Image (cartoon, rainbow, N blue to C red):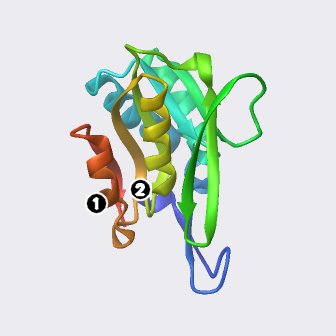
Amino acid sequence: LLSRIRDVADYPEPGVMFKDITPLLADPAAFTALTDALAEIATNTGATKVVGLEARGFILGAPVALRAGLGFIPVRKAGKLPGATLRQAYDLEYGSAEIEVHAEDLAAGDRVLIVDDVLATGGTAEAAIQLIQRAGADVSGLAVLMELGFLAGRARLEPALDGAPLEALLQV
């Protein structure tokens, strides 16, 4: 998987080394291997639904849910979903943001695996955990393609995960 991830220097701003997963997605064998690995995590955690975080979490989470035989729930940036939603605010390095989910998509008894491409500082994932819990569902785990360990997202998320596993296929 790592051999299919391209480093892009100084994107989106100078000094940042962006991890581009599009070459991995374009390689059917690599994308299948990724989907299979994440679907196995979904099965092992006892998930009943998969949440994908906007936007690359949609690309990864939807085929994982399909492969594991589970429902897929998108967690979107605020204002992108029609109908009744639950919204969760969180802080960014400079400012704040909000995510939301359709209120009827999660319920008590659901066990939710959160899927995303990268774990960086953990802010979005932490907000998703809070959103899922507010909906009455349980978080069965968090699965990411890669974890940027130097940004300490894992340490931030472990209390919120309350013993649920955090699985990173790659550590960078």
Percent position of residue 24, x then y: 55, 51
Q: Amino acid at mark 1?
A: Ala
**Residue drawn at x 76%, y 37% as measured from the top left:** 80
**Residue drawn at x 34%, y 67% as measured from the top left:** 152
Crowding near the residue tagged with mark 2, few <14, some 14–19, many ≥20 C-alpha atoms within 10 Å: many
Q: Check disc 2 and report its element: helix, strand or loop.
A: strand
Percent position of residue 131, x then y: 50, 36
Image quadrant occupied by the C terminus: bottom left
On residue 155, the disc is: 1
Residue at the limit of the structure toward the bottom, as seen here: 15
Percent position of residue 34, x then y: 44, 41
| 17 sits left or right of 85 in the view | left
- Compare marks 2 and 1 and give the one earlier in the sequence: 2
Q: Amino acid at mark 2?
A: Met
Front in this rendered view, residue 53 or 157: 157
- The residue tagged 2 is 146
Q: Check disc 1 and report its element: helix, strand or loop.
A: helix
Residue at the limit of the structure toward the left, as seen here: 163
Q: Quadrant of residue 7?
A: bottom right
**Residue drawn at x 63%, y 82% as measured from the top left:** 10
Crowding near the residue tagged with mark 1, few <14, some 14–19, many ≥20 C-alpha atoms within 10 Å: few
**Residue drawn at x 52%, y 41% as measured from the top left:** 31
Q: Considering only vertical position in the picture, is 32 above or below 119?
A: above
Closer to us: mark 2 or mark 1? 1
